Amino acid sequence: MNINSTKFKDLKILKLKRFIDLRGNLVKTINKNYKSLKFNCFESYISISKKGAVRGLHGQLGKYSQSKIIYCIQGKFLDIAVDLRINSKTYGKVFKKIINSKNSEALLIPKGFAHGVVVLENNTILLNYSSSAHKPKQEYGINIKSINLNLGKLKLIISKKDKSFLSLNEFLKQKK
């Protein structure tokens, strides 16, 4: 595994090793020997989504905040992470990256970020590792439509809950 830094402190792009033979391929996504990741998996989710599906932007408050590793098993999605760490140089800034099943990349998103995805292909399968338990009462969100995504005419499928969230600007004003 190669671990590449971004301009966002502790947000990493992970280039996973893919093993290919006549049977197909295998990708190792988690290995406790990767000490530099500083990541312990508490729970994991798999989502299978339609093109245009939006999941997020979600986060959890304070001590319930989660680090995540996000990997694409099949298909393609746009990953979005917003830095909400008040003392960070990139506070309020948005990280965007297209992740697909062909490039063997994953993202490590540290605690203190709101996170979401926009699915770009039908039947996209996403694997999400979280460092702590999902606590619905500690969850917050940011309306993804408040982020400039440049997705052309892609019709977004957004849950009622996710539509109800504040815009990024409103959220940031609230935190001051």
Image: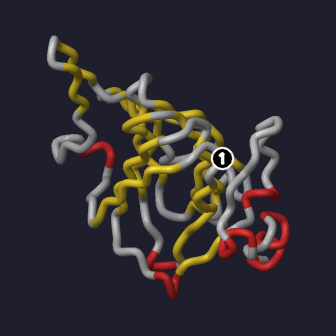
Q: Position of residue 66 (x, y in %)?
A: 43, 66
Q: Position of residue 84 (x, y in %)?
A: 64, 63
What's the residue type where badge 1 is placed?
Gly
Dot 1: within a 10 Å radius of its alpha carbon, few (fewer than 14), some, or many (20 or more) residues? some
- Residue occupying the point 78% across, 52% down: 147
Q: Which residue is mark 1?
A: 52
Q: Quadrant of the N terminus?
A: top left
| Quarter-of-image position of residue 165 | bottom right
Residue toward you, 102 or 6: 102
Q: How many marks?
A: 1
| Quarter-of-image position of residue 74 | top left
Q: Left of 24 or right of it: where is 57?
A: right
Residue toward you, 86 or 104: 104
- Residue occupying the point 68% across, 61% down: 158
Q: Left of 1 or right of it: where is 23?
A: left
| Quarter-of-image position of residue 33 | top left
Decide if residue 49 is in sight here. yes
Q: Quadrant of the C terminus?
A: bottom right
Q: Is residue 155 above or below residue 24?
A: below
Q: Position of residue 128 (x, y in %)?
A: 39, 53
- Residue occupying the point 82% across, 35% down: 152
Decide if residue 87 is in sight here. no
Q: Position of residue 28 (x, y in %)?
A: 22, 35
Q: Is residue 172 above or below residue 75?
A: below
- Residue occupying the point 79% across, 57% down: 145
Q: Is residue 73 above or below residue 147?
A: above
